[in-house]
Image (cartoon, rainbow, N blue to C red):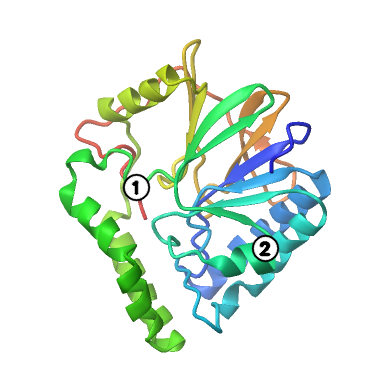
């Protein structure tokens, strides 16, 4: 459980395993530095989805390329902090290995984070505005079905992970190069959550960091660990969006009172 006496950090969308070896090496180096920072700080950690570009647990095997990041996450837990992993749209097949062997709490649904006198609605961010997107809703139901998981487990891990990687790359190619923008439907979603008693909405998925804070509401899109290397900190009741730098000294990103607007956008035109 998250301790209200600790700092709480959030990050999302590293998509480990998605890029070239050179890009992956840099992502991992900065991510490992950040995770060591979390451990040394004694902070609790929330991963808001898509840490991995693909994750699947076979009965006797897990993707071995993620061994080192799992060790660091386990080290945070061993040091006495909590790590909560909220599944995204790329790593929704999370299983018991991460809970029993790494020590993380795993959730496939949005969470309520109550800490430091704050009540935060935390979600990965995919599907929040899919009420009219019937194709996406159907795809979510199919890919998360128990039968599909059982059938996929029958495929040899080397073949299954290779095939899933191809599909993931194709999906990103369709959305790469888009720019951020918020449509009225998302602003209405945030305000509905505020009306339900939350004082902030925090999501990942959309890769472009954004922090909007007014006297009535607060909304943060965490960003990603691919281009922006951003994370969110909750300390003394204040939410601050920061960017991890090569020097290991985080830079604060300013908040705004206005949402970026993009006509005919689908929330923030997610890249993956």
Mark 1–mark 2 distance (CA, rounded to whole Å): 25 Å
Callout 1 secondary element:
loop
Q: Is the residue marked by circle 2 packed among few (<14), some (14-19), or many (20+) residues within 10 Å?
A: few
Q: Could you say which quadrant of the image residue 192 lies in?
A: top left
* Above-or-below relation of 133 to 57: above
In the picture, measured across the screen, residue 269 lies left or right of residue 81, that is left
Quarter of the figure that contains the N terminus: top right
Q: Which of marks 1 and 2 is nearer the N terminus?
A: 2
What residue lies at 29% left-to-right and 57% top-to-bottom? 140
Q: Which circle marks residue 270 in the picture?
A: 1
In the picture, measured across the screen, residue 185 lies left or right of residue 38, that is left
What residue lies at 21% left-to-right and 56% top-to-bottom? 138
Quarter of the figure that contains the C terminus: bottom left
* Above-or-below relation of 262 to 59: above
Residue 265's spot in the image, x, y percent?
24, 37
Q: Is residue 56 visible?
A: yes
Q: Can residue 69 be seen in this view?
A: no
Residue 123's spot in the image, x, y percent?
46, 41
Residue that mark 2 sits on: 29
What residue lies at 62% left-to-right and 28% top-to-bottom? 239
In the picture, measured across the screen, residue 156 lies left or right of residue 231, that is left
Q: Nearer the viewer, residue 16 or 217?
A: 217
What residue lies at 65% left-to-right and 24% top-to-bottom? 238
Q: Is the residue marked by circle 1 packed among few (<14), some (14-19), or many (20+) residues within 10 Å?
A: many
Callout 2 secondary element:
helix
Q: Are marks 1 and 2 in contact (CB under 8 Å)?
A: no
Residue 93's spot in the image, x, y percent?
44, 65
- Mark in front: 1 vs 2: 1
Q: Which circle marks residue 227 in the picture?
A: none
Q: Which of 97 and 120 is in front in this view?
A: 97
């Amino acid at each position: 459980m998250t301790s209200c006496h600790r700092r709480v950090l959030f990050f999302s969308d590293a998509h480990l395993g998605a890029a070239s070896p050179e890009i992956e090496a840099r992502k991992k180096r900065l991510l490992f530095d950040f995770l060591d920072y979390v451990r040394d700080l004694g902070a609790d950690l929330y991963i808001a989805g898509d840490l991995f570009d693909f994750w699947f647990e076979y009965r006797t095997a897990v993707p071995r390329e993620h061994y080192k990041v799992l060790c660091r996450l386990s080290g945070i837990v061993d040091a006495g902090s909590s790590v909560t992993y909220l599944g995204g749209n790329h790593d929704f097949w999370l299983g018991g290995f991460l809970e029993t062997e790494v020590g993380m709490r795993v959730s496939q649904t949005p969470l309520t984070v109550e800490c430091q006198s704050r009540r935060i609605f935390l979600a990965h961010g995919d599907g929040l505005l899919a009420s009219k997107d019937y194709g996406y809703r159907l795809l979510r139901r199919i890919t998360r079905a128990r039968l599909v998981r059982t059938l996929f487990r029958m495929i040899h891990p080397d073949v299954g992970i290779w095939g899933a990687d191809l599909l993931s790359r194709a999906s990103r190619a369709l959305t790469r190069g888009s720019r951020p923008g918020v449509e009225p439907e998302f602003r209405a979603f945030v305000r509905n959550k505020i009306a339900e008693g939350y004082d902030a909405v925090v999501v990942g998925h959309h890769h472009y960091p954004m922090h909007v804070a007014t006297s009535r509401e607060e909304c943060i899109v965490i960003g990603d660990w691919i281009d922006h290397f951003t994370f969110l900190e909750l300390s003394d009741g204040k939410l601050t969006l920061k960017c991890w730098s090569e020097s290991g000294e985080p830079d604060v990103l300013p908040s705004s009172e206005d949402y970026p607007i993009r006509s005919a956008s689908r929330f923030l035109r997610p890249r993956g």
